[in-house]
């Protein structure tokens, strides 16, 4: 995975209302990797994918996909990319098989080649028994699998996924993860936006965390988790003023790297031995009654919160 196939240089997008969605973004993505972008709502993820896939015109910088300048040569760029957007864009006038067949024909595949590939992809994506059904009858997970199959129908060098498992039930999400892993194993280059930390951790070779159009961190999931500087993350639920508890623990725990008040609990990222008894003793000394405890290793969520903050975004 040494060959760079997606590159941005100072990529910038400012919308007419003055919102700077992407601000001087520099990225390099290598052939054969799954590259993930994490960020809060409004971070610039979807705009970045829009610019790389020719749907959004940059206001500054450069973007290259497969060596093609996507602004100067958008038609050539479209030949080497496959795109799965957030919304369902399947053709409801066609059945499941026809959605693949006509996509292939649109990209200059011969009739026989398109027939063969459409049938093969339906088998690969566990949709062969639905070939002649109307797409309106598909579940959300099936429709998403069909959109991924359609996106790779013309054998693109790069596949772009924008929140590919948003709104899917756990079983459908796992099924799509399995398919994406198969594509990755076959050498497919994939760039994906996601809100799911587990998804990025499980699938991605490297992850970029962006916020307000800026790149905050970049590395493999393991590398990013090491930046937390803690061995253990303990989540404490207790009765009483949790903001006061968080402040007290930050003062009392010498090994605490970070203490956050999140979702009705207090999370402590800490380094050292005997972490759990140390935290329990500190909580009880402050007069709080513990209702629940959980212990985990640092996660991408820990990194994400550290970098982007804990405030809710619309």
Image (cartoon, helix red, strand yellow):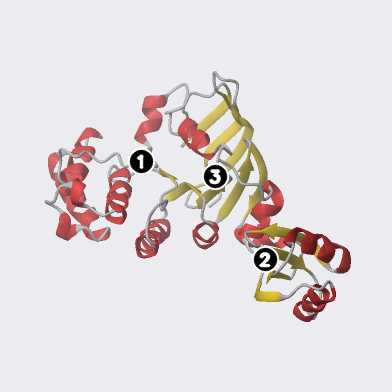
Q: Position of residue 72 (x, y in %)?
A: 46, 21
> Which numbered mark, 2 or 3, is in the foreground of this view?
2
Write down the residue under mark 1.
Answer: 87
Mark 3 closeness class: few <14, some 14–19, many ≥20 residues within 10 Å = many
Cα–Cα gap, marks 1 and 3: 25 Å
Asked whether the residues under the numbered discs 1 and 2 touch, taking CB atoms below 8 Å apart as contact, a structural biologist would say: no
Q: Which residue is depicted at the point 32% across and 44% down?
A: 151
Mark before the other along the chain sequence, 1 or 2: 1
Residue at far front of view: 240
Q: Nearer the viewer, residue 167 or 292?
A: 292
- Regarding mark 2 in the picture, which secondary structure is present there? loop
Mark before the other along the chain sequence, 1 or 3: 3
Q: Nearer the viewer, residue 157 or 209?
A: 209
* In the rendered image, the vertical position of residue 232 relative to residue 38, given as above or below: below
Cα–Cα gap, marks 1 and 2: 33 Å
Mark before the other along the chain sequence, 2 or 3: 3
Q: Which residue is depicted at the point 42% across and 51% down?
A: 166
């Amino acid at each position: 995975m040494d060959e760079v196939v997606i590159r941005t240089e100072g990529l910038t997008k400012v919308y007419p209302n003055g919102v700077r969605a992407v601000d001087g973004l520099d990225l390099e993505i290598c052939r054969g990797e799954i590259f993930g972008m994490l960020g809060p709502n409004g971070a610039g993820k979807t705009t970045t994918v829009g610019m790389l896939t020719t749907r959004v015109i940059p206001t500054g910088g450069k973007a290259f996909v497969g060596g093609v300048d996507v602004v100067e040569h958008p038609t050539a760029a479209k030949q080497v990319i496959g795109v799965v957007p957030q919304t369902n864009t399947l053709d409801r006038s066609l059945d499941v098989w026809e959605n693949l067949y006509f996509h292939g024909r649109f990209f200059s595949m011969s009739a026989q080649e398109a027939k063969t590939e459409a049938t093969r992809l339906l088998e690969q994506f566990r949709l062969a028994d639905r070939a002649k059904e109307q797409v309106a009858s598909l579940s959300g997970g099936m429709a998403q699998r069909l959109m991924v199959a359609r996106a790779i129908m013309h054998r693109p060098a790069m596949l772009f996924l924008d929140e590919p498992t948003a709104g899917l039930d756990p079983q459908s999400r796992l099924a799509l993860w399995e398919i994406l892993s198969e594509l990755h194993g076959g050498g497919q280059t994939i760039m994906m936006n996601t809100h799911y930390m587990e998804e990025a951790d499980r699938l991605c070779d490297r992850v970029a965390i962006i916020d307000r159009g800026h790149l905050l961190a970049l590395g493999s999931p393991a590398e990013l988790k090491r930046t937390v500087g803690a061995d253990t993350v303990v989540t404490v639920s207790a009765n009483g003023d949790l903001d006061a508890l968080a402040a007290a623990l930050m003062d009392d725990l010498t090994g605490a790297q970070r203490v956050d008040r999140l979702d009705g609990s207090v999370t402590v990222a800490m380094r050292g031995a005997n972490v759990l008894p140390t935290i329990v003793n500190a909580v009880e000394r402050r007069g709080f009654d513990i209702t629940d405890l959980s212990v985990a290793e640092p996660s991408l969520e820990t990194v994400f919160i550290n970098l982007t903050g804990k405030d809710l975004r619309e």
